[in-house]
Image (cartoon, helix red, strand yellow):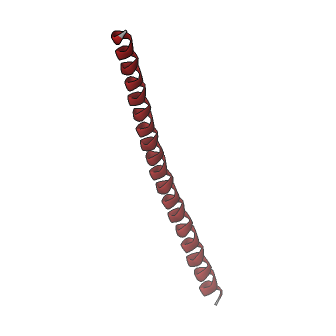
Amino acid sequence: MKRIIKFATLVYTLKVLFELFNENTTIKTQIDKLKEEITKLEMIDIDQKIKDFQNKIDGFKDNIQDS
């Protein structure tokens, strides 16, 4: 009877550990996806700011040439 209880405890412990590691892997995957999405959004924002700056400079150059 003691062997059955020990075996059941071992199986349950292994199951809990496996679920814990599996959950950690899932969380790490989600964190990596979020990092990629943030990087993508930052690059889009930076690209837009560069385009706005270039348009501003081009407009400034046109005003100087018109004068």
Please report the residue visible at 41 percent of the width from the left and 39 percent of the height from the top.
Answer: 44
Q: Is residue 10 shown above or below 42?
A: below
Please report the residue visible at 38 percent of the width from the left and 11 percent of the height from the top.
Answer: 64
Question: In front: 34, or 27?
Answer: 34
Q: Residue 43's spot in the image, x, y percent?
A: 42, 37
Give the residue furthest to the front.
67
Look at the image and tell me in which quarter the C terminus lies: top left
**Residue 49 picture quarter:** top left
Q: Residue 6's spot in the image, x, y percent?
A: 63, 80
Question: In front: 64, or 2?
Answer: 64
Give the residue furthest to the right.
2
Please report the residue visible at 49 percent of the width from the left and 59 percent of the height from the top.
Answer: 25
Residue 42 is left or right of residue 58, and the answer is right
Please report the residue visible at 56 percent of the width from the left and 65 percent of the height from the top.
Answer: 20
Q: Is residue 20 shown above or below 15?
A: above
Q: Is residue 50 shown above or below 61?
A: below
Residue 8 is left or right of residue 30, and the answer is right
Look at the image and tell me in which quarter the N terminus lies: bottom right
Question: In front: 29, or 5?
Answer: 29
Q: Residue 59's spot in the image, x, y percent?
A: 38, 21
Give the residue furthest to the bottom.
1
**Residue 8 picture quarter:** bottom right
Question: In front: 60, or 8?
Answer: 60
